[in-house]
Image (cartoon, grey):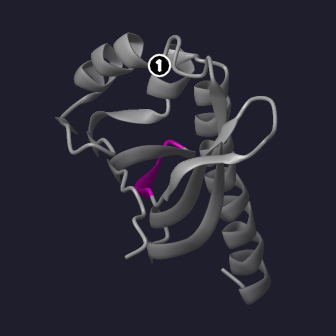
Amino acid sequence: MTTEELTTSRAADLEAIRAVVATLEHSQRNELPDEFVNLFREDALWTTGHGRRLYDRAEISEFTHRVLPGSMREGTVTYEVEHVLFVRPDVAAVKARAQYWTQEGGDPVGNPGSPLYVMAKEDGRWVLVACQNTEVIDG
């Protein structure tokens, strides 16, 4: 593969990774648990911002279907990809910034989040494999 092909391929992967995070945001903002769960690999693991450990898509689905509906009544959330580290061409560690906001004024609510998403490219599609949500507490 030429340098130009590698650059083009990497740019496409970065765009696809950002699209996964954008879909994650869309699914949360619109309370769409099936859209959210579809982003995960079958054997994915996820640790919530409050430390709950979920070990496969079935557990992630059960949890998400229980907590996501109604969660955006009083606010909304945004996610911004801050850094992508390609561990291999088909595996990336993605650091993002999450912020909850009020519906009306657009003021920040609570502390920002600092999620880490490990993603893998499988059958041409980037999926969430291992995720950790962390609340940022300035000390």
Quadrant position of residue 56? top left
Quadrant position of residue 117? bottom left
Query: Residue 58, how many percent across, how many down?
Result: 26, 19
Amino acid type indicated by mark 1: Leu
Placement of the N terminus among the 4 image quadrants: bottom right
Placement of the C terminus among the 4 image quadrants: bottom left
Q: Is residue 109 magenta?
A: no
Q: Residue at x 31, y 41 (%)?
A: 48
Q: Is residue 102 above or below residue 133?
A: above
Q: Is residue 115 left or right of residue 31?
A: left
Q: Residue at x 58, y 73 (%)?
A: 83
Q: Which residues are magenta?
A: 115-123
The residue at which mark 1 appears reads as 68
Q: Is residue 4 left or right of residue 109?
A: right
Q: Is residue 97 left or right of residue 86?
A: right
Q: Nearer the viewer, residue 115 or 17?
A: 115
Q: Nearer the viewer, residue 6 or 56?
A: 56
Q: Residue at x 57, y 52 (%)?
A: 98
Query: Residue 21, how many percent across, how many down?
Result: 61, 47
Q: Secondary structure at mark 1?
A: loop
Q: Is residue 84 above or below residue 119?
A: below
Query: Residue 100, how many percent across, how many down?
Result: 60, 43
Q: Residue at x 53, y 12 (%)?
A: 70
Most prominent secondary structure in the magenta stretch? strand
